[in-house]
Each structure stands twice: as structure tokens, then as C-alpha cells.
Amino acid sequence: MTSTIISTEKAPAAVGPYSQAVKNGNMIFCSGQLPLDPKTMTLTGMNAAEQTIQVFKNITAVLQASGANLDNVVKTTVFLKNMGDFAAMNEVYASSFGAHKPARSTIEVARLPKDALVEIECIAIT
């Protein structure tokens, strides 16, 4: 099966040697999205909730470029700089997915690129 590199200007450009997403068959593997404004490549939001809103805008853009949407997501991994931000992130997360509830892991990390408070990656199936 051939993999297709997914790229869109509606989400932040990759800041390293990786793709925004890779589609193989009916599976889409989205790289971790940071709370970056895709036009300026600057960090948005002063807290975890505001940053999570931008992360979901970026994930949605990458999924749309892949021919999918949040309803196609089957697994997410959330990286938090501080587990104390879990409730704020989780409120935005829940409202973004609505009744859809993909499998999820949440991990506290020492540091994220650009000193972000949250990063989320996902796997979707179309």
C-alpha cells in the first residue's frame, strides 16, 4: 500500500523533517499539532484551554485535507506540560468531539516544542 503525504496551508507547516499527516489506505496518522497560528507560526493562547482550541483548529484542518473529520478519529494522544491543566484541556477536548469518544492517552511531559502547554496527535480511519 502506498502512503500519501498530507499537507495544508490551513494548519501550521511542519517545523522539522516530518509530515502534517500520512494517509495509508483508509488510515490517517496525524502528527502532533501545537497551538500555532498557521499564518504566523506563532504560539496562540495564554492558557491550556485557549491553546487546545487552536490545536483542534489545526487538527481539523489536517483531517479535512485528508478527506476526514473529527468523527473519523479513533485514537488521540494528548501531551500536557502540566497535568494540572487536564481539566481545562479536557473541557475543550470534550466540546470538540461532542458525543464521539475516541480512545485516548494523556501524558505529562517536561517540555513541548515552542514551550506550548498542549500538543495532540491522532489516528483516524475513513
Image (cartoon, grey):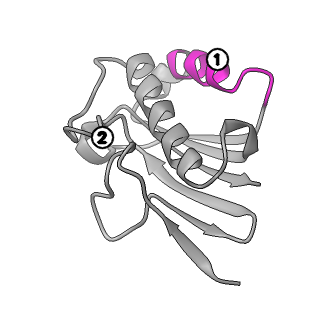
Please name whichever residue, 22 or 101, is drawn nearer the observer in this view of the structure: 22
Please name whichever residue, 115 or 63, is drawn nearer the observer in this view of the structure: 63
Crowding at mark 2 (Cα within 10 Å: few <14, some 14-19, many 20+): some
Mark identifier at residue 123: none
> In the figure, residue 64 lies in which quadrant?
top right
Crowding at mark 1 (Cα within 10 Å: few <14, some 14-19, many 20+): few
The residue carrying mark 2 is 38
Read off the magenta span. 88-100
Vertical side of 110 occupied by 1: above or below: below
- Amino acid carrying label 1: it is Ser
Chain-order first, disc 2 or disc 1 = 2
> In the figure, residue 76 lies in which quadrant?
top right
Q: For this view, does 86 lie left or right of residue 118?
A: right
Q: Position of residue 20 (x, y in %)?
A: 44, 58
Q: For this view, does 77 lie left or right of residue 81?
A: right
The residue carrying mark 1 is 95
Residue drawn at point x = 45 percent, y = 39 percent = 58
Q: Quadrant of the C terminus?
A: bottom right
Mark 2 lies on a secondary structure that is loop
Residue drawn at point x = 66 percent, y = 21 percent = 94
